[in-house]
Image (cartoon, grey):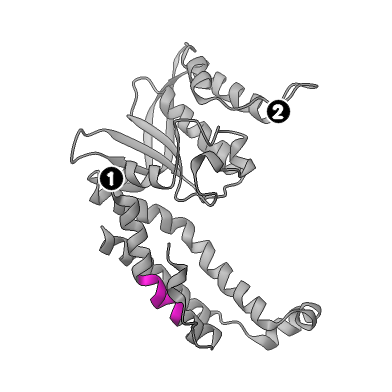
Amino acid sequence: MKLAIQSVIKEMMDRVMNKVLQEDPFIKEKHKAKTPLYAALVPDEIFKGSHFERRFVTPFGKVWERLAVVAANEGLGYGVTDHTIRGTVRKERLRRISEVLNRLEHPEPGQERIRPDWNRELEYILRGRGAMIPVQVVCDVYAEARNTDNKRYAFELKAPLPNSDITKVSKEKILKLYSMDPLQIDGAYYALPYNPYGRKENYAWSFPSRWFNMREDGVVLIGDEFWEKIGGLGTYQAFIDAVNEIGEEYKARIYREYLGIEPPANLEEGRL
């Protein structure tokens, strides 16, 4: 698993390095011509770092999904991205899903915003009856536990600090998956690849908290919870080990090849 993880990360990093060194390098003269005031006030090196950051962060969105598939293939037995799940949902359940989301987004005049409560919301939605309506949901990552009990899992995998609109769409998709009759999955989750706040009980990014109780809802998986769900025990540590092993190599290359300076002696201090 570690080698497979490293292969995905190396491929992305090599593309990024080629982008910033060959295809789209930082050119001081171009920067000064476009933003002369900034160039007069702030050292070029600061903007050179920003130039690299933008070309690094953007492609990492899809890399998380690819890494999740690696973990699923090595752990559960099968994983794929952008998988379509088809089923039927009762008409009243669909209406109640819209109602729940609307109440979370738009509180009644003069009242405080309703706090999300996954169990209470789903219980209310599942009491809905009516005609069966065909529904399809495209999930970020789909996995099957082919090595054990053949259970099927869907994951909405988002960046660690997601915005509100993206989270709303994910919640609607997960509610639809749990409302299908018969169920087409054994579990569906809203997942973040790591926690910038450390422990789950400390997660404090406000935007997704509008839609989920990020600290308590059982459908929310953050960091090691997600990786071990999709890949089994030890997956998160394998991920950490894989990144640490190749991290120093790429840091040194960025210092020398992009920034044009020698790397500091304490590169290992950046290990996870």
What residue appears at the point 30 percent right and 51 percent down from the top-left corner? 235
Mark 2 and 1 residues: CB-CB less than 8 Å, in contact? no
Residue 74, percent across and down? 24, 51
- Give the number of the disc on residue 128: none
Residue 69, percent across and down? 32, 51
Q: Is 175 rendered above or below residue 214? A: above
Disc 2 crowd, CA 10 A, few/some/many (<14, 14-19, 20+):
few
First in residue order: circle 2 vs circle 1: 2
153 or 2: nearer the viewer: 2
Q: Which residues are magenta?
A: 246-252
115 or 272: nearer the viewer: 272
Q: Is residue 86 left or right of residue 262?
A: left
Q: Quadrant of the N terminus?
A: bottom left
Q: Is 255 rendered above or below residue 168? A: below
Residue 113, percent across and down? 70, 27
- Residue placed under numbered mark 2 in the picture: 106
Label 2's element? loop
Q: Quadrant of residue 136?
A: top left
Q: Quadrant of the C terminus?
A: bottom left
What residue appears at the point 52 percent right and 79 percent down from the top-left corner? 20
- Residue placed under numbered mark 1 in the picture: 233
User: Label 1 sits on what residue type?
Assistant: Leu
Q: Nearer the viewer, mark 2 or mark 1?
A: 1
Answer yes or no: is residue 82 visible: no
Q: Quadrant of residue 240?
A: bottom left
Residue 138, percent across and down? 43, 40
